[in-house]
Amino acid sequence: MFNRSMFTRLPAILLFVLLIALRARGAEMQMKVTDNGYLDAQGFSVILYHNMYHPIFVDEKNAALQMILHGQRIATNGDVRLMPTPEQWDIVAQLKGKEADKEHTRLTARLFDAASPRCVYCRSVAALLLCANMMSNAQNNEASQSIPDAPTPAERTIEDLNYLGGDAAMPPFSDSVIDIDSEFRQGLFRKGLAFRVIAGPQYTQNMLDAPVAADEQVYVGQRAFESMFVQPILSADLRQLHLRHAQLYMGGVWNWVSWNPAGPKTLQLWALYFYKAFGEDRVEMKAGYIANNMNFLGLFVGGSTATGAQGVYAVLPYEVGMSYFPLTAPSFNVRIRGPKNTYIKTAAQRSIDPNGGPTEVARNHTGFRFIPHGDKLVLINEGGYLRAASADTRETWVRGGYIYNTTSYRNEATGQLESGNYCAYALMDYQVLKSSREHPIHGLYAGGSFMTVPDTMNPYARYYEARLYKEAPVRSRPGDVISLVASRTGYSNIFTDNLVAEGKTVWRAGTTVTGSYSLRATRGNYVSLGLSYVAGPAITPRVPNALNVIANWSLFL
């Protein structure tokens, strides 16, 4: 039964009058589920289990189901109690999970009664559905009198136009310099479109030695290294074609670097693909020009492109032809979500040039060239287990995969061109500590990586990494990330032996330890500062160790 203390008489009467008035006037209002998990309309919000009861006293006034009218909390503590006559400090059901269903405009909380071995569903949902249905009817009455710009199903939000179906996430449109409620954003959204620009400079400098001459540079930071990119993106949800869970994603990039081997310098296509999800997003498909570093392996610490935290440094997947920012290649990707948090995904992609990014750009200036001569098929396969953080579970992500390239690479042992280059990899991330039940993803994470490629075809042959990172390291700064990453890259013995035979000095491996702090300065504005010690910063020549200071700035417009 419901706790009878949920409503006082006056708020209940006001709420009833509000709903009846909205229905009678046919107001242009419609409740919808927001990205924050609220049921929201203009001036009125319903929140379900955003705040929890105290585990002992259970006497909070702002817990369970809450209703807010024009910023004033008019009803709280909508809860399920199984006692015949609940009292103030009786045991309450424990929250096991909650769902925000945009498609059906519904919030659901799964509760567990400690005194009874069964789960119960919070019947507070009935009140939410009452609000949603009455406001939806008001919207329908008004909508029938005019013709919209395009069909706009109730469940569509502007976040349907954000980057979808990848391992990495971009910040929500609400976290942009341009306000999400501006006429620019909303005018495009009414047409099923979104436009954003991402920009950012980077600076790296070795602090242990004086800069070398330009023609002597062999690693990033040996001279002051600057880079800059500008990335415009246009996405469409294809509502005019009456498609759901679909997207056309288009983007270009201008990328400039002060040292081209770390680039490349380019002005070209970055993304042009069609995305579609099937079966409640259990199957996702992408087809077009795709940078697959955002779709496989999970190379971004914290899972976001915004933080700029120093993460997985491995270049091994790129050595064997996987596409990566700012480069793109034709690709067909499929991801299937299996039972119990498992997944498999695969891609058939045209290879990036075996000689690396600068050669790829020289042969394919615009990025549109479908199959440059000699570039063949890359097959990427990955399987994993991904359990998202919740109030009662810690995030766990284990994945492994295999990349196989049919393009011919030079075999340094035989001097012949051969196909069959590959990369095998395994990575794991686990949430060791959780900082907040209200924000389950906040906390301390630990992770590790291993990658290997044939040392006959690739100068960088093995990669090992251990990492620690904390999301929201300070309670008042939920958008920040602090990280500590240690990695070791083994250089190919065949490559290094050949260099020694030529009379050159070499490093056999490189070891890096990097600490960084990524700060969300303001809305859409991220700054990352890091310090990285590198032993063996280049294969040849055997230059001294380096201590690089690294600064990144990311701006989301």
Image (spheres, rainbow, N blue to C red):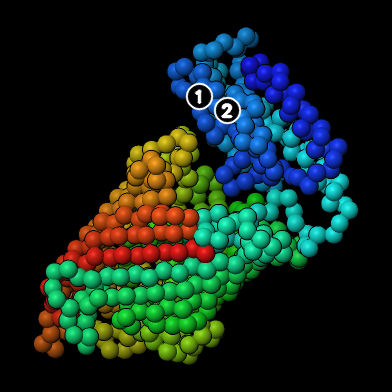
Q: Give the number of callouts.
A: 2
Residue 460 location in percent, x, y? 27, 73
- Give the amino acid at mark 1: Tyr
User: Is 9 situated above or below 325?
Assistant: above
Q: Does the image show residue 128?
A: yes
Percent across and percent down for residue 513 are 22, 59
Left or right side of 227 for 329: right
Can residue 353 be seen in this snapshot? no
Nearer to us in this view, 334 or 69: 69
Residue under the image location 35 percent in, 88 percent down: 417
Q: Tag 1 or tag 2, which sits nearer the N-term? A: 1
Q: Please give left or right for residue 9 compared with residue 225 in the image.
A: right
Callout 1: SS: loop
Other residues around mark 1 within 10 Å, as few (<14) / some (14–19) / many (≥20): some
> Which label was assigned to residue 53?
1
Occupied quadrant, residue 80: top right
Q: Secondary structure at mark 2?
A: loop
Amino acid under label 2? Ala
In the rendering, at what x and y percent does residue 317 appear? 38, 70
Picture residue at 68% right of the left edge, 40% below the top: 43
Q: Are marks 2 and 1 in contact (CB under 8 Å)?
A: yes
- Name the residue located 31 percent from the left edge and 65 percent from the top edge: 551
Q: Where's the N terminus, which quadrant?
A: top right
Q: Nearer the viewer, residue 14 or 301?
A: 14
**Cα distance in 3D space between marks 2 and 1:** 7 Å
Q: Quadrant of residue 424?
A: bottom left
Which mark identifies residue 532? none
Q: Residue at x 75, y 45 (%)?
A: 29
Locate residue 71, reporting x and y percent.
61, 36
Name the image quarter holding residue 456: bottom left
- Provide the residue designation for mark 2: 64
